[in-house]
Amino acid sequence: MRNPTTGILLKLGSVALFTAMAAILKGTAAAVPAGEQMFFRSLFGLPVILVWLALRGELATGLHTANPMSHAYRGIVGSISMGCTFAGLGLLPFPEATALGYAMPLMIVIFAAMFLNERVGVFRLSMVALGLAGVLIVLSPRLSVGVGDVSASQSLGAVLALTGASFGALAQIFISRMVLTEKPSAVVFWFLATSTVLSLVTLPFGWRVPDAGTAALLIAAGVMGGAAQIMLTSSYRFADASLVAPFDYASMLLAMAIGWFVFAEPTSGRMLAGAAVIIAAGVAIILRERQLGINRARRAETPR
């Protein structure tokens, strides 16, 4: 049953939970390394997915896969993205890390042309160029290490955030092929399972036994991530992807509020300007693709 309002509310709920999860990970970055954060986020997201499948009566079929190796490849790429993103969160102001994450949809356009042979027109290329210009605006304070209050750790954080966005885009390319034969629930579950195992590779590199408060926060982050993924998936059952996709950018408002009130990180005018350019480019691509889809549907319905 299509219900756009429900779809939008579910999308906004997923955005809020993902943003809250990211805030928790930033807040615990000083206590545990990114690899350990990835372990908690992945492991404690798994039970949420299993309970959801059980309630839907799909536990027996929802995890079936016809192509296990595709999950392995997607898991490796996605785990690199997750690890880099989490590490970047600990080094950058929260709104800035969020803004750099918006580079992922732009990278998807580039990778789709490179690896899927998708036709990318002048409009989309122009918007990608505009969005990347916005990324450079956000990045510009991090390009001059040692000048003013720019530190090497913040510059590294920017590199990690962009690397995470790039690998995240590559993971989406894998997913676009996988969903032709795999159920979304299987894609999510086996990714979390793979990233849980892969996170253990970082065990020798600074893992610590967290105190009770930190452990509770990390478990909450995993549960939030699992719940957010379910809400995101469910939103597409009620509304078109092109309708709900722009609401991803609501995370910028949440990130600014959390950065200000939780982490005492004021948002600079330069960062806001860059984020606005990135968001404008992303929304323009979404609206353009939506209109093209409507036009194609109309042509298909026109009697010949």
Image (cartoon, rainbow, N blue to C red):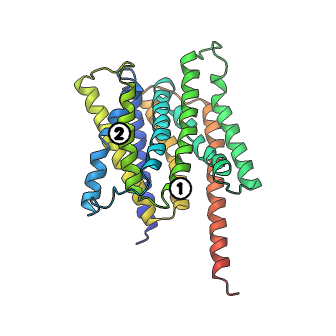
Amino acid type shown at disc 1? Arg
Which residue ends up furthest to the left in the rendered image? 212
Location of residue 27 (image quadrant): top left
In the displayed structure image, the side of residue 265 where residue 29 appears, left or right: left
Residue 262 in view in this figure:
no
Check contact, mark 2 vs mark 1: CB within 8 A: no
Q: Name the residue under label 2.
A: 42
Taking 210 as reference, is 238 left or right? right
Residue sitting at x 53%, y 49% = 174
Mark 2, secondary structure of its residue: helix
Quick one: quadrant of the N terminus? bottom left
Q: Residue furthest right?
A: 122
Q: Position of residue 221 (x, y in %)?
A: 34, 37
Q: Is residue 16 left or right of residue 154?
A: left
Mark 2–mark 1 distance (CA, rounded to whole Å): 23 Å
Pointer 2 or 1: first along the chain: 2
| Residue that badge 1 annotates | 177
- Badge 2 density bin: few <14, some 14–19, many ≥20, Cα 10 Å: many
Name the spot of residue 44 as percent of width and height, x first. Answer: 29, 40
Q: Which of 33 and 17 is in front in this view?
A: 33
Most extreme residue toward the bottom, as rendered?
303
In the rendered image, the vertical position of residue 255 relative to residue 116, given as above or below: above
Q: Which mark is residue 137?
A: none
Quarter assignment of residue 31: top left
